[in-house]
Image: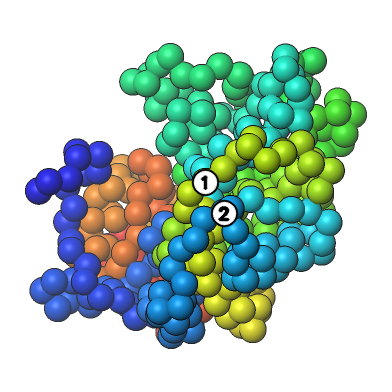
Amino acid sequence: MNLMNTYPPQPVTFVRGSGSRLWDDQGRSYLDFLSGLAVTSLGHAHPDVAAAICEQAATLLHTSNLFATVPQREVAATLDRLVDAGGGRVFFCNSGAEANEAAIKLARKWGGRGRHVVVSAYGSFHGRTLATLHATGQPAKHEAFQPLPEGFRHVAWQDIDDLDRAIDGTVAAVLLEPVQGEGGVQPAGPDYFRAVRRLCDEQGVLMMVDEVQTGLGRTGEWFAFQHYGVRPDVVTMAKALGNGVPIGACWARSDVADAFVPGDHATTFGGQPLAAAAARAVLAVMQAEDVPARARRAGGRLSRALEGVPGLAGVRGLGLLVAAELEPGRPAGEVASAALEAGLVVNAVTPTALRLAPSLLVTDDEIDEAVTILAQVTA
């Protein structure tokens, strides 16, 4: 293998996918309830997305962001409407980490010199670049890469008093996930997010919401913050936007976005025609299928079914982003491996919990099949 040693040994080589199914190089079929870490939200090889990619590849693959393209403008307009019913602007990039990098730079430019600190929560995950790694509230991940860029501060998750104490004249923004995904699928409470919004307004700092894993229908709303009745100043997204084609985006209210001027931030590939054409097709299917409603209904069915599975101590999450907490003594990594051997793809999001994030077009029969396999491996 010529790959760097950044992942554990890969147990399966997948060669083909269709809908909620994957096939390996031995011809064996698997039910995919991870969706490439909440990426393939319309399933594998969705025909509309595949057709859009093929057509765009044969039409215009790349120019640069020195010039306009039609797909990019249309996707920006759709995202602005879905996030905030209009009234914002979008910066396109290639990943969730890059979207959060853009948000951090925007906060610093908006705040001005000396007002640059970003406050985030312990247990959070915001990316693997040096800045987004420091924004990530997991100190164990920091140590190998010290010294990290300065200007980041962490507070206890869902502790509004701790957040209040952390905000001073050096703080430009608060960056939070509405559901801590890599932190174990831990939803924020509505009261907490509303209190954060009030505090940000009182202190004159930006409220930035990381929707990289939760955005675009996954939790039962277009964006998970919409469950909580708040209006953020900045929203980041990626994963599901391209259904597997790398694309991310940072949305900001127009008055906040005005802090950026030409030359402040840039990207060679972000929002280029191929990726934007894929995203345009993804968003069209998502709206036609009303994926937030599908996620609410299917997520309810999945969570209810999991509650009856032996070996599980509890279920949490929103919509189709679900964690199944195992009873003590059952390492999640071992259970995920057993599920894979039985034909179900999930992952150990913590040492004690499995993450399930199936396609937003998942069927009832596929949910029932997944739960049956989990019941077999957890019994």
Disc 2: which residue: 65
The residue positioned 51% from the left and 28% from the top of the image is 131
Dot 1: element? loop
- Asked if labels 1 and 2 touch by Cβ distance under 8 angstroms, the answer is yes
In the rendered image, residue 231, in percent from the top left (x then y), is placed at 81, 49
Q: Amino acid at mark 2?
A: Asn
Disc 1: which residue: 267
306 and 365: which is toward the camera:
365
In the rendered image, the quadrant that contains the C terminus is bottom left
The residue positioned 76% from the left and 31% from the top of the image is 110
Instruction: Please tell me in which quadrant of the rendered image residue 180 appears.
Output: top right
| Residue 188 in sight from this viewpoint | no
Choose the circle earlier in sequence order: 2 or 1. 2
| Residue 273 in sight from this viewpoint | yes
Q: Residues within 10 Å of mark 2 (few under 14, many from 20)?
A: some
Q: Amino acid at mark 1?
A: Thr
Q: Is residue 319 left or right of residue 86?
A: left
Instruction: Please tell me in which quadrant of the rendered image residue 76 appears.
Output: bottom right
Q: Disc 2 or disc 1, which is closer to the eye? A: 2
